[in-house]
Amino acid sequence: MYQQQKIRLEIDHRELDENFQPGEVILQTQQNLDYFPIGGDFDQKKKAVLNEIRSTPVYKESLYFHYKVYLDETIIFQYQGFFEPNPQLRTHIKWAWSESKGMGEGMIFTPKKPKS
């Protein structure tokens, strides 16, 4: 009897600080992957994981990721980097608690535009 191998993705999400650099880990997630190009090259594997991450409703331009892909219990691929490759499109979110709304509110900051 054939048993399908389990492919699992683990991600550490790091927020970007005021200087748009990786800060603290704010969330650790894991999920099973239906598809991963085990025999593919680096770019194909990276693209498969980023496509999976894109499906989550998060402000990804404010995050830095470190992810690992496991086949059963063996790491078969890992990568870390900014989700948004363009530094001018990255954001920093400063959170504050709103007493009146009873929830956190975020202010989004973007890098200053270079002077021409």
Image (cartoon, rainbow, N blue to C red):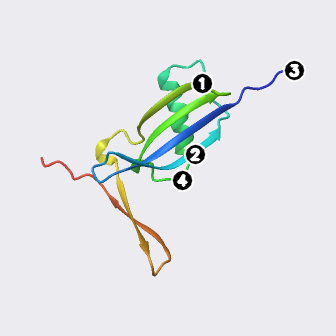
Q: Amino acid at mark 1?
A: Pro
For the residues labelled 2 and 3, the Cα–Cα distance comes to: 32 Å
Mark 2 or 3: in front is 2
Mark 4 or 3: in front is 3
Q: Which dot marks residue 1?
A: 3
For the residues labelled 4 and 2, the Cα–Cα distance comes to: 14 Å
Residue 108 pos. (x, y %): 35, 60
Residue 109, compared with residue 70, is above or below; it is below
Q: Residue furthest bottom?
A: 100
Disc with the residue nearer the chain's start (1 vs 3): 3
Residue highlighted by disc 1: 37
Mark 2 or 1: in front is 2
Mark 4 or 2: in front is 2
Disc with the residue nearer the chain's start (4 vs 3): 3
Residue 103 pos. (x, y %): 49, 72
SS at mark 1 in the image:
loop
SS at mark 3 in the image:
loop
> Taking 67 as reference, is 64 left or right?
left
Q: Amino acid at mark 2?
A: Thr
Disc with the residue nearer the chain's start (4 vs 1): 1
Residue highlighted by disc 4: 57
Disc with the residue nearer the chain's start (2 vs 1): 2
Along the line of sight, the residue nearer the viewer: 54 or 104: 104
Q: Residue furthest left?
A: 116
Q: Residues within 10 Å of mark 2 (few under 14, many from 20)?
A: few
> Taking 31 as reference, is 96 left or right?
left
For the residues labelled 1 and 3, the Cα–Cα distance comes to: 23 Å
Question: Residue 48 is drawn in which quadrant?
Answer: top right
